[in-house]
Structure formats: structure tokens, C-alpha cells
Amino acid sequence: MAVNFEKMLRGRWLLRMGLGSLLLGAFACAPESELSPSPNANPASDVRVSQLPLKLGIQGITAGSYTQVYVATNASDGNQATYWEGAANAYPNWLRVDLGSANNVNQVVLKLPTAWGARTQTLSVLKSADDVTYTQVLASATYTFSPSANTVTLNFTETSARYVKLNFTANSGATGGQVSEFEVYGTPPTASRSAFEQRAASSYDSQSGTQLEAASEGGQDVAYIDNGDYIAFTNIDFGSGANTFEARVASAASGGNIEVRLDSVTGTLAGTCSVPGTGGWQAYVTRSCTISTVSGVHTLYLRFTGGTGALFNLLWFKFSAAASSGGDVVGKLFAGYQGWFNASGDGSPNNGWVHWSKNSSAPTANSNVNFEIYPDLSEYTKLYPTNLANLGNGQAARLFSSYDAETVNKHFEWMQTYNIDGAALQRFGADESDAPNGWRTNRDSVAVKVKNAAETYGRKFYVMYDITGLNPSTWLNAVKHDWTTNIVNTMHLTSSSAYARQNGKLVVCVWGIGFTDRPGTAAEAADLINWFKGQGLYVIGGIPTYWRTGINDSRSDFESVYRSLDMISPWFVGRYGGLDGADSYKTNQWQPDFAYTQQYGIAYQPVIWPGFSWANLAGGPRNQIPRLHGDFMWRQAYNLKSLGISTGYVAMFDEYDEGTAIAKAAENSSMIPTNQFFLTLDADGVSVSSDFYLRLVGDINRLFKGQIPLTVDHPTSHR
């Protein structure tokens, strides 16, 4: 008996090489019975038994031999009086049915003519996906057929099979095997499952040679993998094409290989992914490998190859369509940039306070404050006095203006310093009119300063239209007019070397498509998307959280619109809170969202945010969705990256109003006015530096790009 010492060292007591002979010996001595002796050929396999097995349709039946006129088709004609009989004294005889496609089977019923006398037959049950390689389902055992019913039912652990074969070695009533009806029961093929969803390796439909064990990252891994072992999954839908295979693996040995094969364990080889030694059986890493493009629905086999001894453990896997190359947004991290703050004396056309206060007057304690987080002002060269009391450290309470080029330059300098790829410039108030307007003039002036700053600091930017509040009857033409007249022809933003491009196309985003409380029908949204695409643009949609299901914040008739976008960016701010909320969204939103976009070739740009609060703006509770000193934002990034997502949108860079700003902010009470509530970065009891969230986002970008390892705790120091 061969002993696998590697597996013994890892705590495995079962010697695989000797298991088959031990079981064969046991069943050779089993008592005769009308029921299966219920052999358990692999006690570590994942048991799936249907509660109510259904009789499965047989597409064909053949035999290795037959006697006289007792051909194989007699065993599937529905007539218990006719029968198949194998060639005389030529054991083993075999009889095989073809179910037409892979099914989950768990029962075989064999019948003989009811008028026949008692007899015993010795047989085994085998299965195959390709009619080439067969594996044992039930070991050889002796069964009694009794007069009257003359029926034997063989039950076994549910397994996937297309072909089911009976192998006869003895019959007390004849010189060959005999069957009048060969019936197979189980469950028909399940609905196809997306290849683009992360799938636990332990959820296989069938396997050979592996065992399951508890994994350090949760769930069970497929373990004790040897050369030639495999796991299989039926009805996996690769959509219009997948060409990347990703797997979570661990190995204390030298690793091995995962072969991606289709429709049988020796079927078409789509690709091979090598697994390195990772330093431990629970020291997981994610391997990503390019494979030949696979499309359509297949039975997937992951076959494991390598040297001798245990190779590696496999926790999960997924497929994806390779990200488009040569672009500024796919695989990058952008931050939303408002640029909407004004102060009295800044020289802007608005000529007063905007967004800092509820009207054009200076912010005043407990009456005219519109923002939640007080910025750290230590690096600004232009500041404007407010009506607020001095800060806790005695300094005057002043604020910046986004109209100043110095302010915009500082923000883009921070983006460069802290590893943020670029900014999505918010574009509000699109209008069909070109009449002079102070607010529009101010907005456009800031846009040009963003272009200049992006060029200076090597960052990218693109225009993001926010259609909130636009006139439902004119919004479509307003956006088209603004793009052509202002963005392209007047400000020449798209001529900038800093303007983002993807796949060689200029990038534009329209935020608000499909929301129940924003303007635009599905036909109008499709019109705008097609209009932009007709000019050679790459179109991103800022869309509702529940876009995929068309419920809650999403209109129900926009699926075709969402699918027409080049990239989608669902809005998640305020939808959940806490680490458990981020974990829930990973399972219920991000994973199925990402699988959908992969299947239809759409890029996915989820929104990541640090926390949320707007007590001063809207009267909500203070610190409504806590930042948890960075843990909340990192958990979002960790979960997204664990799904294979590497593109993101940060909400927001400078949104001090709603408490989502990542730009430098007040650390504690010494940096805010003494007579007005403002949320500070130490609100949850942990002191962090004013630039902590900029540093955290920089690390998230490195995580997404694979430059630092995936860890459940953020690597960013608080100070």
C-alpha cells in the first residue's frame, strides 16, 4: 500500500492510495440486499443528495455486448417484459446510458421482468462526463432481485454525470448481466451559473482525489491536492468571452499547476495557471493568469498537476474579461472634485459665500453654517475671514475659495503627492443658453483652473455631468449644447494633455442616469449615450445602487441603457454603514454587479467613501455614518479587491458639506471654531493626522494596482 507521507504530515489519516482496495474488499463481503449497501467511496467529499429525485431522460443506451435479440435498447423502452442480456460467459458485461448532458444523479433503479424467479447480480456503477474517463460511483457489490417487483434501487451521494455505466461480473440466474429497465434519477442540469462570479472551490459538483478542510480566511478550501486530482462544475456560463482566470491559493510546498479544461477532465485546455509556494498551507495569495478566450456554457474542470506529494490548497476562483489596455480610468482610482466653494472677497462672479454658508453671507455659528467638516488650512496661501469664533488653538476661523488658482493647484498637488490618479470634475447646471451668468462663469473658470492644475501636477481629469435639478424637458439638449459649446469649443478642455482617455477615446461621465428622482426617460438617456459615442467618446454612467435589479433608487426600464455604457459607477454613499454593512454589500451588490459587468463587457467603477454626516447641512445626526478611523473605507477596498475589482471612484475629494471629503481636515477640537459643531477626524476616539485619508486612499490605489498585498487591516499609519 502506497503511503503519502506529505499528507500524513499535514494531519491526514486517510491513505488515498489504499482506499479503493479497502472498499472493494468490504463490499465483496457485503450481505445481499434489495437496497444499495450505501458505500461511501470518498467520506471527505461534499455530500449533495436530492430530497425528491426525478427520473432523468435517457438520450441513448449502448452495451459492450448482447446475446441473441436481447439488445441494449430493450433496457430503456419502458417495457419491463423486454430485457438486455450480455454475452454469455464473457464478463465483465457493461450497459451504459447517455443522459444527453451533465446532470446531478443520486439513484439508479434496475428492473427485471416481474415473472422471473429470484436471482443475484454482482455489479458496480460508474460515471463519466465524456464517455472516455470513468470514475466509480458504487463499488462492486451483490444485489438480490426478488420475484414480483424484481426491482433494485441503488442510492449514492449526488454527483454530476452525463454517462452512467453498469459493470456486471456475475449473475446467478444467467451467464451474462440482465436488465429490463435501466432508470437514472436525480436533478436535471441547474440553471447556468456565471463564470464571472467568485466561486468557492468547495462548491464543486464532482471531484476526484481531494478533501475539504477549514480555511483561515473563512469557509472551506479544497485541500490535499495531488497530481491528477480535479474538481468539476456544471453549467458554467462564460458569456461572450472570458480570458483571465483568478484563484486564491496557498502552498507550503513548491506549488503546482491548475489546468482549466472544458467539458471533461481531458477536454479542451483553455490555459494553465502555475501556483507558487506561498510559505504555508493557509498563507493565501491570489494568482491571475491569462487563458484562451472561453465563451458559452460548459462543464468546467480544474485539473491539478505537479510533482509528488500534496501540491496546494484552493479556496476560490473566478474568471474575467481582461481589462482594456491603454487607458486612464480602467484600473485607476479617481476622486470626485466639486470645486464649488466661494468666499466674499475672492473676486469671483458669485461675489459672496457659496457652499460654506446657507446664503451669500459669511458663515455664522449656529445659524448660517452649511458644511460638516472643517478643513485643515495650514497649507493654503489665500484664506478669507468668517464670522465664526477663533479656532481652539487661537487662530482666526478662515476658509478657502475654490475660485483661487492657488487652491485648485494645492488640491492637485495633494493628488500627486498622495497617489491619486485624477479627478472627475463635477459639472452642474448644464444649460441651452449662452447668456451671461455669474454662476456659470464661476463654474467655467474653475474648470479651466482644474485643467491647468492637472497638467502641472501630472494628473488626469474628465468632466462628470450631474443632471440633478435639470429641467426634465430640456436636460438632454442642455448637456449636448454645453459639451459642444463650452467644454470643447470655448474652454478646450478636451484638447488638454491631461484630459482622460480610455481605449483611445475621450472620457465623459453622466451622473444621475436611471435614478427615480432625476430627469430623463430611458429613451432620452440612450439618446445621450449614443450621441456621445457617435463622437468617439468613452461614456461612464453614474447610476443607482440597485441598477441591476431595477428597484428602490433605480427605474425599472433602464437595463438596456445601463448595458450600453462603457463603464458604470453605481452610487453607494449613505447606503450602508459599518464593517458589517460593507461585508453585506460585497455579497449582495458588488459581487453580482461585477459578475454582470464582466459578462457583458462593461467596466465597473464602484464608489468608495470614508463616512458620511450632514448635521449642519440637513439637520441629520452628528457623525451619522462613522469613519471608524479608516477601517470603514479600507474594508470597502479590501472587499472589492478580494472580488478582483481594481477600478474605483472616491466620493469625494473636497465634499466638506456632507462629510465625505478626503482632503486635509481638522484633526481635533483645536482646529475648529470654539462656538460651532464641526465633525473632526478623531470623532471615534482615535487620533489621526489631517492627511490620513489622503494617505489611506493612496494605499487603496496601491492595493488595487497590486503594489501592496491584500490585508484585512489597512497598512496606513494613523499619524
Image: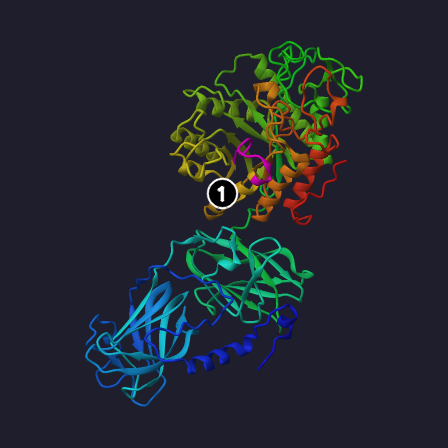
Q: Amino acid at mark 1?
A: Asn
> What secondary structure is found at the residue carrying circle 1?
helix
Q: Position of residue 272 (x, y in %)?
A: 56, 63
Magenta residue check for 480: no
Q: Which residues are magenta?
A: 570-580
The residue lying toward the viewer, choosing from 483 and 23, is 23
Q: Where does the C terminus fall, quadrant-wise? A: top right
> Which quarter of the picture shows residue 279?
bottom right
Q: Does the image show residue 339?
A: yes
Residue sitting farthest toward the bottom:
89
Q: Position of residue 515 (x, y in %)?
A: 45, 29
Image height of 546 relative to 164, above or below: above
Q: Position of residue 713 (x, y in %)?
A: 67, 44
- Residue at the spot x=46%, y=35% of the render? 534
> Which quarter of the picture shows residue 233?
bottom left
Q: Position of residue 341 (x, y in %)?
A: 64, 19
Main SS, magenta residues: loop
